[in-house]
Image (cartoon, grey):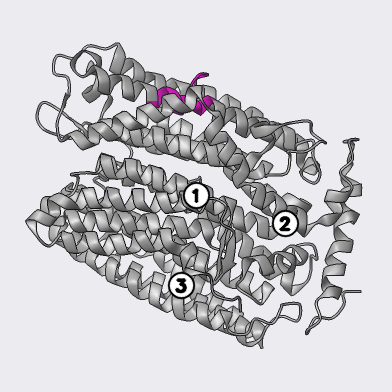
């Protein structure tokens, strides 16, 4: 049972990572990091619910971690959207490919 | 469930957090804004005073563990915090000064908590509390579109790194069954010694992901590509902060994770190969890229990548080489103490260099950035020129400067560790690493000397001139003063670095009593005999745990 959950979590995380690397729109990229966080949360909850045989019994730590991750992801979302709005005011574009003012000569 | 910690132990962090709120409120009125930097300074000094009175504090609970390592990180963070405040005194626009300084205090609060975190949840939250304010500080520093671009890049890659670290933590939690790091050591290091099991796969994935994410905080290759853009777009005084706060946070977290894998005590796990490759890549890539730069900010950014590589040499060596076996003593035998010393010295030198850049303006009023801008500085602003040169000599590691003592400690401890079990298994690789690091240090001298030559020797008909207030000048002077002090009286900081690692060495020894026992003066310890010593411990550990854990026979 645990393996199935871990695989779904890994799939969510990997899809998010692929999206992070390949997409150009800043908001979509941000949504991809959110998807990665969902994968992590699923991982934590699954490992908390179905502990490994060798693991010590600390039943609620995983669930608590998941709740904190949701809060952190919300804080990051607030900051990310602020930055996106700011950047749009300066450049009128949300294309990550236009962020090339700063680069190696 | 650990019992809660006494609130008095948390007093320094509470002072910082309450101070952050107070400074935020002060920013609402014009009179308050003038007061805000002074209050920030008072909060930092007050918090440091409380830390000093709690010098011998050892307390644990609520996911925190206060001991010698936390003490060192608290003092280092607050000391650098004072310098950072001085250098950033009037960096933000007047109406944003309260927010700016408040975020600075919050970031330092996070750094203090990283040093004390003893729980995966607490460690993750503390890392985020350290990082998130820095994204905003970059944007707030009056650099317009460039600052926004720099802050956005840093934020996105920081969010990615946070996700990778959290994913790694979730696997480590799964293997240990508890978020407490002290409780997780035996489970994780035992799992890493049983290839083929599910626990092994999860532990391996967790360790690799976590270390990978932390390398981002350290700006080590291959996760360094963002750093030059971030430094270039950030205002110089804020870039000085970025060289210290995330690096110390990343290193403190890395110590905890490496301790978790049992690398220092048993020499197993993926840590050695992973960090070896990253160290070599960081040094080489950082130095080669720095050679090509004309912007001093980008040059310092890539030099920071190389310095992250040097620091990893000390992390690989670990705290254990200090023993009768190797005959090494003091800093030369203790990799982690050397890293702590080095990160403070690097932080001060880097901050000093950026402070000088930040308090200068070109004749057209622009920000001083390129080598051409600082050419001929000696004639126009001799104090600034000498400070910049001193910072560069320190980063280069020229003998009397503290940068030299730091490098000596890092490389010396690696050579000592190459003869000490269990790391001796990788001895030849460690020696190769030191040779690569020394060659890299020589290579790095090329670009540092270019800056020094531009500042001291070249002529410029339109040299940069000093602008801005007195506080940044005081901050820059203090950086230079501290570098001189550490150069001629290195023992103070070295000693505190050494005592800070007592905790890690104790924990390592406690995890493997076997090793402590068979430390004989005969230092011949072949690799084959190191292995079996480890396995009985893992089995004994498994038998000792009563609940839900079958004996591994």
- Closer mark to the observer between disc 2 and disc 3: 2
State the residue at coordinates (45%, 28%).
B395
Q: Does label 2 lie on the same chain as label 1?
A: yes
The location of residue B260, given as percent across then percent down, is 67, 60
| Above or below B52: residue B361 | above
State the CA–CA distance, disc 2 to disc 3: 29 Å
Please give the chain letter of the residue carrying mark 1.
B
Does mark 3 fall on the same chain as mark 2? no
Mark in front: 1 vs 2: 1
Report helix, strand or loop for mark 3.
Answer: helix
**Please, which chain is the residue tagged with disc 3 on?**
A
Whether tag 3 and tag 1 are in contact, CB under 8 A, the answer is: no
Which numbered disc covers residue A36?
A: 3
Q: Give the number of the disc on residue B73.
A: 1
**Main SS class of the magenta portion in the image:** helix
Chain identity of mark 2: B
Asked where in the image residue B534 lies, by quadrant, the reply is bottom right
Residue B353 can be seen in this image: yes
| Quadrant of image for the N terminus of chain A | bottom right
Q: Quadrant of residue B423?
A: top right
Q: Is residue B118 above or below residue B301?
A: below
**Residue B535 shown left or right of residue B76 in the figure:** right
Q: Which residue is mark 2?
A: B262
Earlier sequence position, callout 1 versus callout 2: 1
For the residue pair B59 and B320, the one nearer the viewer reads as B59
Residue B89 percent coordinates (x, y): 22, 44
Give the magenta-colored segment's residue range.
B391-404
Q: Give the CA distance from mark 3 to mark 1.
A: 31 Å
- Mark 3, Cα crowd under 10 Å, few <14 / some 14-19 / many 20+, is many
Name the residue at 44% across, 55% down.
Answer: B111
- Where residue B473 appears, as percent x and y from the top left, is 24, 31
Is B93 displayed left or right of B523 in the figure? left
């Amino acid at each position: 049972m645990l393996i199935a959950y871990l695989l779904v979590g890994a799939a969510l995380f990997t899809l998010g990572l692929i999206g992070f690397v390949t997409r150009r729109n800043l908001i979509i990229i941000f949504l991809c990091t959110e998807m990665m966080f969902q994968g992590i949360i699923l991982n934590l909850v699954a490992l908390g619910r179905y502990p490994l045989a060798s693991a010590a019994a600390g039943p609620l730590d995983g669930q608590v971690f998941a709740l904190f991750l949701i809060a952190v992801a919300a804080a990051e979302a607030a900051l990310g959207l602020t930055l996106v709005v700011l950047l749009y005011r300066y450049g009128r574009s949300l294309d990550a490919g236009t962020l090339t003012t700063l680069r190696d000569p | 469930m650990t019992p809660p910690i006494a609130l008095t132990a948390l007093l320094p962090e509470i002072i910082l957090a309450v101070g952050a709120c107070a400074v935020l409120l002060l920013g609402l009125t014009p009179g308050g804004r003038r007061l805000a930097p002074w209050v920030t300074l008072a909060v930092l000094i007050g918090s440091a005073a409380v830390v000093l009175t709690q010098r011998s504090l050892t307390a644990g609970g609520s996911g925190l563990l206060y001991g010698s390592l936390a003490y060192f990180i608290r003092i280092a963070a607050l000391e650098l915090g004072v310098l950072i405040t001085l250098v950033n005194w009037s960096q933000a626009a007047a109406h944003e000064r309260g927010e700016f300084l408040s975020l600075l205090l919050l970031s330092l609060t996070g750094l203090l908590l990283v040093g004390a975190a003893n729980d995966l949840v607490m460690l993750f939250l503390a890392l985020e509390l350290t990082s998130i304010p820095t994204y905003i500080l970059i944007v707030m520093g009056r650099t317009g579109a460039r600052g926004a671009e720099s802050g956005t890049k840093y934020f996105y890659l920081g969010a990615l790194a946070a996700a990778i670290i959290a994913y790694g933590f979730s696997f480590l939690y799964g293997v240990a069954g508890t978020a407490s790091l002290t409780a997780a050591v035996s489970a994780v290091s035992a799992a890493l010694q049983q290839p083929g099991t599910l626990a092994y796969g999860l532990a391996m994935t967790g360790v690799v992901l976590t270390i990978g994410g932390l390398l981002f905080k350290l700006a080590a290759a291959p996760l360094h590509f963002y750093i030059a853009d971030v430094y270039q777009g950030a205002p110089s005084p804020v870039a000085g902060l970025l060289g210290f706060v995330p690096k110390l946070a990343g290193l403190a977290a890395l110590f905890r994770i490496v301790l978790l894998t049992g690398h220092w005590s048993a020499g197993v796990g993926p840590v050695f190969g992973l960090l070896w490759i990253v160290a070599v890549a960081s040094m080489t890539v950082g130095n080669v890229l720095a050679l090509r730069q004309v912007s001093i900010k980008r040059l310092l950014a890539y030099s920071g990548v190389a310095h992250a590589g040097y620091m990893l040499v000390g992390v690989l060596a670990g705290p254990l080489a200090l023993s009768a076996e190797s005959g090494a003593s003091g800093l030369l035998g203790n990799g982690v103490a050397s890293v702590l010393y080095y990160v403070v010295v690097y932080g001060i030198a880097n901050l000093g260099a950026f402070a000088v850049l930040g308090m200068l303006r070109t004749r057209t009023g622009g920000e001083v950035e390129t080598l051409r801008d600082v050419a001929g500085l000696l004639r126009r602003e001799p104090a600034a020129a000498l400070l910049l040169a001193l910072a560069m000599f320190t980063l280069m590691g020229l003998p009397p400067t503290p940068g030299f003592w730091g490098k000596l400690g890092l490389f010396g401890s690696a050579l000592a560790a190459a003869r000490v079990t269990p790391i001796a298994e990788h001895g030849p690789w460690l020696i190769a690493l030191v040779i690569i690091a020394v060659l890299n240090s020589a290579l790095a001298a090329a670009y540092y000397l270019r800056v020094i030559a531009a500042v001291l020797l070249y002529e410029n008909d339109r040299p940069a001139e000093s602008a801005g207030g007195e506080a940044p000048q005081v901050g820059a002077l203090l950086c230079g003063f501290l570098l001189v002090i550490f150069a001629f009286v290195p023992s103070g900081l070295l000693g505190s670095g050494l005592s800070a690692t007592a905790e890690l060495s104790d924990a390592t020894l406690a995890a493997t009593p076997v090793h402590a026992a068979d430390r004989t003066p005969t230092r011949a310890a072949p690799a084959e005999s190191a292995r079996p010593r480890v396995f009985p411990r893992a089995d004994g550990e498994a038998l000792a745990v009563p609940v839900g854990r079958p004996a591994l026979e």
